[in-house]
Image (tube, rainbow, N blue to C red):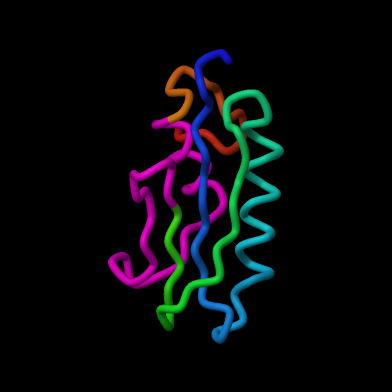
Amino acid sequence: MSVSKPRISIEYCPKCGWMLRAAYMAQELLSTFTDEIYGVLLIPSETGGAYIVSIDDLVVFDRKAEGRFPEVKELKQLVRDVVSPEKNLGHSDRN
């Protein structure tokens, strides 16, 4: 097997109704990082209010710590900075 690609996980609070938000973010990440990641895992959390995005064991965004949800553009930048720093995100890139 070749070098393994990073796996992204989105842990979300199902009681808060955040599954669709997590699924949308997963779709955006899968579309943007098709060749760079292994996949995106959606994890229903047992912790109320959880919305945590991780790459392997590295937390890149935690809603509780930030006090808000990530914007799609911001999340793509955070993931890119870890999985493929040289990747140009086009219109989602920082200016």
Q: Is residue 75 magenta?
A: yes
Q: Is residue 43 above or below residue 92?
A: below
**In the image as oriented, which residue stretches furthest toward the top?**
2
Q: Is residue 31 above or below residue 43?
A: above
Q: Nearer the viewer, residue 89 or 81?
A: 81
User: Can you give x and y, in whole percent of width and height, for residue 79 in the image?
Assistant: 47, 39
Q: Quadrant of residue 58?
A: top left
User: Can you give x and y, in whole percent of width and height, for residue 17 in the image?
Assistant: 62, 81
Tell me where the magenta segment starts and ends, as one range: 54-82
Q: How many marks?
A: 0
**79 left or right of 31 in image:** left
**In the image as oriented, which residue stretches furthest toward the bottom?**
15
Give me the residue at 52% from left, 69% from top: 12
Give me the residue at 51% from left, 23% from top: 4
Q: Quadrant of the C terminus?
A: top left
Q: Is residue 81 above or below residue 86?
A: below
User: Can you give x and y, in whole percent of width and height, for residue 35 in the image?
Assistant: 65, 24
**28 left or right of 7 in image:** right
**64 left or right of 56 in image:** left
Q: Quadrant of the N terminus?
A: top right
Q: Quadrant of residue 66?
A: bottom left
User: Can you give x and y, in whole percent of width and height, for residue 76 in the image?
Assistant: 53, 42
**In the image as oriented, which residue stretches furthest toward the left?**
65
Give me the residue at 40% from left, 31% from top: 81
